[in-house]
Image (spheres, helix red, strand yellow):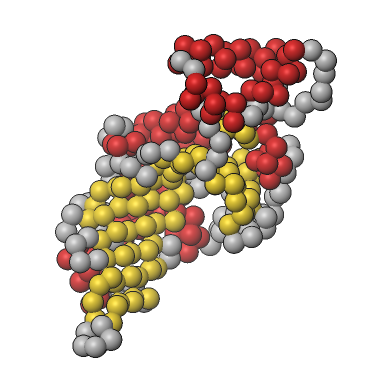
Amino acid sequence: MISFTRSYPKDKTLLENNILYEDLFDDVKMTINPKTKEEGYPITSSRSGVFVTIDKYRAYVNCITKVVKNSFSDKKLRSYENLSLSDTKTTVDFINGIIDHDDAKLSGVHVGFTIPTTIPGKEIIKMNVLMHKYKYCNHDLVRNKKEYAKEFVRHNFKIGLYARKDCENKNSLKIELKLNKNAEFKKFQIISINDLTNKKKLEELFNLLLKRFDELIIVDIFEPFEGRDYELLQEFLNYRYWKKLANTSSRQTQSKHKKKFEALIHRYNLDTKKIELKKELNKAFTRFISN
């Protein structure tokens, strides 16, 4: 469920000393002044999925939880498999063994699951996922030619869907909420990485993921048919329609059009794919929290 964390310690000195003078990290890099040959900031280091960057004022610690887990476990998780709660707890313990997070505050958390699908995940992302809150995606991309994705970027978060090309199970996709501001999770009393093992707080994060998922416009593919309803659907499925409406109409008018669109989706049963994905998300969370 928790795929990535970003945190920063209040006092970077202890972490900096541990990296430079202890044997916790093998890979340590520093900037060298070409004139004076003196070493300086930034200092970067990594070990087993834990990545540290230290500048003159702060230290930042990024953790990719699946990489961390696979680094010390005999049972390696494959690309389409999710961590369990027990995996998360042992991963947090391992991270704390490298870097003490007692005084480190979280500044970012990624929450999500890879779920099974009835057709290749790439097809769903490309054909069914249209908008988030009636706005088009910010990124419709292939990353390093290994992943097809759609990301919707908002002020404090990103909601994205991802399908890996090299995944052993093509009929799967990852749905992930990237919380880039601590205001998004601080309200759940999630302050440090240690809070990410608390069942109640994890449930709050999952409910937030579901809330953002519900805001996605995911519509089944349908055949053309006669009548005004088809013409309306064609208009409503175009993000440019909503962009123009937002610039030219009142909120009350926009609300009426949205309700009309939602009624058409239900009338013609065009939300089966979204219902299926949400059902799989709930199943994934149930498996996560009970293991």
For the image, the number of numbered tags is 0
Query: Residue 236 at what x, y percent from top left?
Result: 64, 23
Above or below, 13 against 114 in this view is below
Which residue sits furthest front?
248
Query: Residue 290 at what x, y percent from top left?
Result: 49, 36
For the residue pair 178 and 101, the one nearer the viewer reads as: 178
* Res. 173 image quadrant: top right
For the residue pair 265 and 192, the one nearer the viewer reads as: 265
Above or below, 57 against 111 in this view is below
Query: Residue 95 at what x, y percent from top left?
Result: 35, 58
Which residue is at 79% across, 12% downward? 227
Above or below, 241 against 256 in this view is below
For the residue pair 27 and 248, the one nearer the viewer reads as: 248
Q: Determine whether, in the image, residue 51 is placed left or right of residue 271.
A: left
Which residue is at 28% across, 82% downward? 32
Q: Determine whether, in the image, residue 190 is placed left or right of residue 234.
A: left
For the residue pair 91 and 263, the one nearer the viewer reads as: 263
* Res. 16 image quadrant: bottom left
Which residue is at 64% across, 60% downward? 145
Specify whether residue 49 is in view. Answer: yes
* Res. 39 image quadrant: bottom left
Q: Determine whether, in the image, residue 116 is placed left or right of residue 33.
A: right
Query: Residue 268 at what x, y percent from top left?
Result: 73, 16
Specify whether residue 279 is in view. Answer: no
Which residue is at 67% across, 23% downward? 235
